[in-house]
Amino acid sequence: RFWAAAVAPRPSHRIEPHPAPNPQLTHPSHAMAGVVEKRLSVLGLTIPKSQAPAANYVPFRRSGNTVFISGQIPKTEEGSLLTGKLGAGYTMEQGKEAARVCGINLISQMREACQGDLDRVKAVLKVEAFVNSTPEFTDHPQIVNGCSDLFVEVFGKEVGAHSRFAVGCSSLPLGVAVEIGAVVEVE
C-alpha cells in the first residue's frame, strides 16, 4: 500500500516561473549596478569580447572569490598584435600603449569571470607583467603603468590599485611587447 501511494498519480499543478530577482535587493553593491560600465563609456573605452586561449590553458581560473587571469597579450580588437622590443626601437609610448591594451584584454576576462557585471570586481589584487626588452632597458615599471593606470581609471583607486611585478625578458610569444596577467577578487 505504501508504494502504491508513492507512485499514484498526483493532481497536476501549474508551476509558475520565479520572477527574476531584483538586483537592488540581492546585494547592497548592486544598487549602483553599471558603475564600471558607465565609467568605461565616459572614458570612451570599448571592452572587446574576451579572446580564446591560444594553447592548452584556460583564460582564467576561479577559486572562491579569487580569479587568476592568464597572461594577456596586446592584441587589439581589430586583431593586430603590438609587437616590438623596448630598448631596440620600440618607444616608451608604444610600450605603455601595449600594456594598456593588455589591461583592456584583462578587463574583458574579468567581465567574463563576473558573468558580464564588472561591478562585481571588488579588488585588483596583483598585476604580473613581462616586458620584451633589451638587457640595457630598465624602465619596465613605467611601461606597465599603462595597465596599472587604466585599472585605476576604470575601477577607481580603492578597487583598481594593486600590487605588481614588472620584469624584463628577452622575448615574448609572437614577438609582442608586453604580456600581463592579473589576480582579482570578485563577489
Image (cartoon, grey):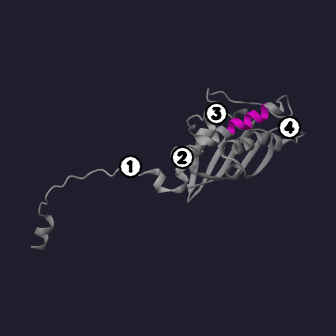
Q: Quadrant of the C terminus?
A: bottom right
> Magenta stretch containing residue 96, yes or no?
yes
Q: Position of residue 110 (x, y in %)?
A: 59, 46
User: What residue sits right under mark 2 in the picture?
Assistant: 33
Which of the numbered marks, if any, corresponds to residue 20? 1
Which of the numbered marks, if any, corresponds to residue 45? 3
Residue drawn at (62%, 42%) of the image: 107
**Label located before the other in sequence (2 or 4):** 2
Q: Position of residue 171 (x, y in %)?
A: 77, 38
Q: Who is closer to the viewer here, 173 or 76? A: 76
> Which residue type does callout 2 highlight?
Ala
> Which residue type does callout 4 highlight?
Thr
**Label located before the other in sequence (1 or 3):** 1
Q: CA distance from mark 4 to mark 3?
A: 31 Å
Which of the numbered marks, if any, corresponds to residue 134? 4
* Local SS, label 3: loop
Residue 56 in sight in this render: no
Residue drawn at (11%, 63%) of the image: 8
